[in-house]
Image (cartoon, rainbow, N blue to C red):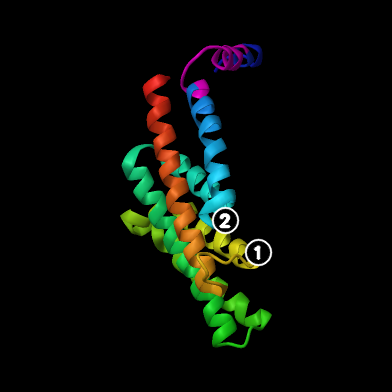
Amino acid sequence: MPAADERHHLEWERLTAWGEPWALAVVFGVASVPWTYGFVAGLDLPLWPAFIASATYFAAGHGPKAFVRGYASNLVGAGYGAATLAIVDGVLGGSVLALSLVVGGFMLLASLHAAVPLLSFTPGGFLGYATLFGVHAADVTTYGIGGVGGAFVGTAVAMLIGGGIGLLADEVSSAIG
């Protein structure tokens, strides 16, 4: 293992030379400008789920398979979140105990995704679940749809776009890095 001063030097070299880290930083930074503007100024979608999905893509790996695994996990997690809210508020009366029990059930189910190849990027399910709760708590209306349905549509569409932007940024940065 290199000495601490040697590791520091290697990181500095990597940071100061053109390569993959810089290529991705430039591409992602440039892409974030129209991405943010488009979401905020006209798409009628919450922005943060797109960034969460893009991060999910990079955490899941690289290439189309990472995109599919990451987005499928995000989408199913968001679906679990929507189902949680619908069950708790619509069927069980909205108590904290009911919320706790239903969350526990869906978290158990999401944890089993490791055994399902398409959903095997398990953190993506948790990220989708939490993102849906955030979008719902922000009372987002998407394309005129409010409530849990609007939160799900907004989360699902924004995460699809964000994951796609992650894949595109990865491909472009690999080509120029």
Residue at image x 47%, y 17%?
A: 19
Q: Is residue 91 above or below residue 149?
A: below
User: Which percent across, then down, holds residue 159?
Assistant: 47, 53
Furthest toward the front, the residue is: 42
Q: Quadrant of residue 169?
A: top left
**Magenta span has 17?**
yes
Residue at image x 33%, y 55%?
A: 118
User: Which percent across, then down, holds residue 27?
Assistant: 49, 28
Question: Which amino acid is tagged 2?
Answer: Pro
Magenta stretch?
A: 9-22
List the residue tagged with mark 1: 138
- Quadrant of the frame with the N terminus: top right
Question: Which amino acid is tagged 1?
Answer: Ala
Classified by dominant secondary structure, the portion drawn in magenta counts as helix
> Dot 1 lies on which element?
loop
> Dot 2 lies on which element?
loop
